[in-house]
Amino acid sequence: MAKCFNDSDRDAVYRAIHERRDMRHFVRDPVDPAVLQRLLEAAHHAPSVGFMQPWRIARITDPALRMALHEAVDRERLATADALGKRRDEFMKLKVEGMLECGELLVMALMDGREKHIFGRRTLPEMDLASVACAIQNMWLAARAEGLGMGWVSLFDVDAVRTLLHMPEGARPVAILCLGHVDRFYAEPMLETERWASRVPLADCVFENRWPEENKPE
């Protein structure tokens, strides 16, 4: 039987999971290149369906490109606010990204040519996206262990970002990741603090054998 981690190592894994936060507030300090390399390696060691490794990571070092990506996000932020109806004003008060303050800006994307990968995707082609999400989570947990914050930005027009990054046909951006130093980590998810939403009880998400019946008569 495989040996488990020792108590302190095991506790550190669970601590990173529970203390990971989607960060939007950053300190304008650079990220150590050696630390960034470790985080990229962590992402690259994520599981992937059929071992296809569909993630592609663009590091944004051009200030003009960073600003253009920020403008694309801000356009979608306004469009999202309009689509929220009664919650528009509430949404507009939220800080949804830290793209101009973070030390590193990364764009996580799906590679082109994914159609040739059939193993594990014949009936579930979206497993390529699930694999990229695993890579993002690996980086997120590693960043927390390194004392760095990371935020996932998904408010953008896919084609606009594809054009800005000169992505080939078939490739598509999945996330803009803000990575950098923070003064502190939020005590709880920021959207919970802001009363936008709250964590669903675990019991509502786990069931046995069959999907639970909804609206079952008493």
Image (cartoon, helix red, strand yellow):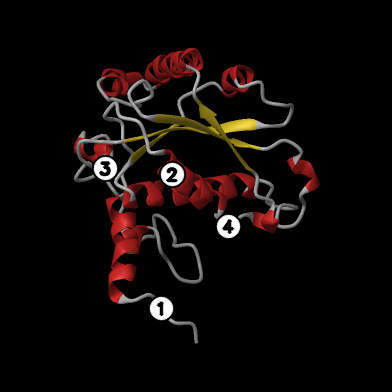
Q: Residue at x 45, y 46 (%)?
A: 39
Q: Nearer the viewer, mark 4 or mark 2?
A: 2
**Is residue 28 visible in the rendered structure shown here?**
yes
Q: Amino acid at mark 3?
A: Pro
**Is residue 218 visible in the rendered structure shown here?**
no
Query: What residue sits right under mark 4 in the picture?
Result: 47
Q: In the structure shown, which secondary structural element does the residue marked by tag 1 occupy?
A: loop
Q: Which mark is residue 4?
A: 1
Q: Earlier in the sequence, mark 3 or mark 1?
A: 1
Q: Which mark is residue 34?
A: 2
Q: In the structure shown, which secondary structural element does the residue marked by tag 4 occupy?
A: loop
Q: Where is 202 relative to 26, above or below?
A: below
Q: Amino acid at mark 2?
A: Ala
Q: Are marks 3 and 2 in contact (CB under 8 Å)?
A: no
- The Cα–Cα distance between marks 2 and 1, rounded to whole angstroms, is 28 Å
Q: Nearer the viewer, mark 3 or mark 4?
A: 4
Q: Residue at x 49, y 82 (%)?
A: 2
Q: Earlier in the sequence, mark 4 or mark 2?
A: 2
